[in-house]
Amino acid sequence: MEGFNQYQLIALDDALKRVGNRKPLLIKLLNAFINNPRYNEILLAYEERNLEAVAIALHTLKGVASNLSLERLYKCVESLEIIFKDAVNQGDVSVFDRTNGIDIAQIAKDTVNEVSKVIETLV
């Protein structure tokens, strides 16, 4: 994804504000993300070439990323969600040839690994 690394991983100040500056709660929420990052849903939908399922999985992941202030993941998923919503509206399955579910899953996995390091700094 071009430009993906131009965004910070997490807007930590914003994330803390969202949880009322309660670090233990933020740690709990970030751990929940790590334990269920939702990228398997995207991979399964890609394998099935199910436009609607990919769009829904991307929307869900975008919401999680937004709520946790995971800026980099949010920006990536946001643009992909737009692409897939358009594809759903047009019935355009060629979108699977222009995008790669494995790449999307890898971005989410990379985010999980980086979030683990952020949690260590919060403890």
Image (cartoon, rainbow, N blue to C red):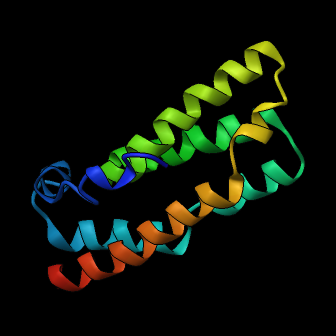
Is residue 82 at all visible to an observer of this figure?
A: yes
Q: From the top left corner, tell me how far across and down residue 88 is, in percent.
A: 76, 22
- Tell me the quarter of the picture where residue 111 sits: bottom left
Q: Quadrant of the C terminus?
A: bottom left
In the image, 69: left or right of 121?
Answer: right
Nearest the camera: 59 or 31? 59
Task: Report the residue at 62% width, 58% height from top.
Answer: 103
In the image, 8: left or right of 50?
Answer: left
Placement of 99 over or under 92, stated as above or below:
below
- Tell me the quarter of the picture where residue 31 sits: bottom left
Q: From the top left corner, tell me how far across and down residue 83 is, in percent.
A: 61, 27
Q: How many marks?
A: 0
Task: Report the residue at 66% width, 19% height from top.
Answer: 86
Nearest the camera: 6 or 43? 6
Is residue 69 at all visible to an observer of this figure?
A: no
Nearest the camera: 18 or 11? 11
Q: Residue furthest right?
A: 48
Task: Report the residue at 28% width, 60% height from top.
Answer: 9
Placement of 120 over or under 63, stated as above or below:
below
Q: From the top left corner, tell me how far across and down residue 84 is, in percent.
A: 67, 30
In the image, 56: left or right of 28?
Answer: right
In the image, 29: left or right of 103?
Answer: left
Task: Report the residue at 50% width, 43% height from top.
Answer: 77
